[in-house]
Image: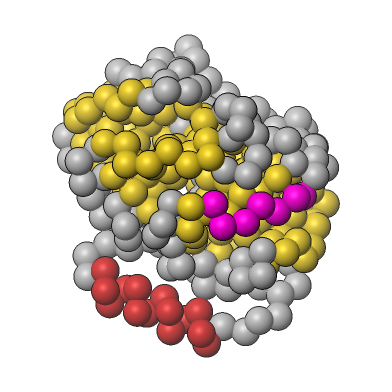
Amino acid sequence: MSGFWFKGKLSLLVSAFYLLSSAAGAAHAQKVVATIPVLFASDVTVNPLTGLGYVPAGNGVDIIDEKKNASVGFIAIDSSYGAEEAAINPFTNKLYVSTSQALYVVNTVTNKVIAKVNVPAVGVAVNVVTDRIYVSDFNSSVYVVDGHNNDIHKQISLSGGVENLAVNPVTNRVYVAEETFPGTVEVIDGKNDKVMASITDGGALTFNVGIDTIHDIIYTADQLGTVSVINGATNKLAATIHVGGQPADVSVDPLHQRVYVANSGLNAVQVINGVKNTLIDSIPVGNGPDYSDIDILRDQLYVVNSQDGTVTAINTK
């Protein structure tokens, strides 16, 4: 799942990111640098502070070292249901792993499960500023979990089938993808945990969400061949980009305004120029790429190829 960003003195951090963005070069030569075998891989999340990636796989989580681009460990999850998705708070060293029956909390210093939250969990996202965890249940609910005590803070009811979700910690808003016709994104205000907007995007069967946290732009992967661009300030559809295939996930590099689309229908990662909203590249990967995450500190994108049990590492620099 995509991104983390911002804690503490937000204004200083936002200013620093803007400076980094303006100083960064425009040239990119994305290329595959490694293919990592991870049996039953279903998702990936990276911790840019440690350079470690976490891949839910079977009844546990594989650990990937970004320097070696290799699996260096495994965290067992005591569940008869397979691990599905994961999200990390790099500031608390807590990893949140979803299964269909519960959300597991892992201490990534000891690589041990330290708590179990009894919610039917599918998608999971973390607000690293408020330390709230948002969990979708695939039906019509989003659960809000307090990261301090692992208690369920609230259950938010939505109208459609909830898929995946993402958090913008700068604006404290949560964006929830609904697999509907037409595609829909529900916007939750993190201040009061209430739905503040329902956006009809430019596609259908909205599966996943990625966020440019610097420029407040939301991107959705719509499974019938489009990527929708939403203005986070106005909650309005800004553009629809036709990419073909079956877009499954979106990871965003806000420093270079590049958007990476894992397209399971094309067995490729497509690259979008976020300034012009145009498709600029397509990178072949494994079979059935459906989840991804990017470490913008190391210019590394990781893509899960669910049909062949691998994770593709792409250098985005």
Residue for point 58% across, 73% down = 256
232 left or right, relative to 274 = left
Residue for point 38% across, 53% down = 168
Is 118 magenta? The answer is no
Corner quadrant of residue 58: top right
Task: Point out residue 68 in the picture as x, y percentages from the top left corner.
Answer: 62, 58
Residue for point 43% across, 84% down = 19
218 left or right, relative to 283 = left
Quarter holding the C terminus is bottom right
Is 239 magenta? The answer is yes
Corner quadrant of residue 310: top right
Q: Which residues are magenta?
A: 237-243
Tell me if residue 91 comes above or below residue 254 in the rendering.
above
64 left or right, relative to 288 = left
- Depth order, front residue of 208/192: 192
Task: Point out residue 276 in the picture as x, y percentages from the top left corner.
Answer: 66, 70
Does the rendering let one see residue 166? yes
Please identify the dominant SS of the magenta region: strand
The residue positioned farthest toward the left in the image shown: 149
Task: Point out residue 199 in the picture as x, y percentages from the top left corner.
Answer: 48, 42
106 left or right, relative to 190 = right
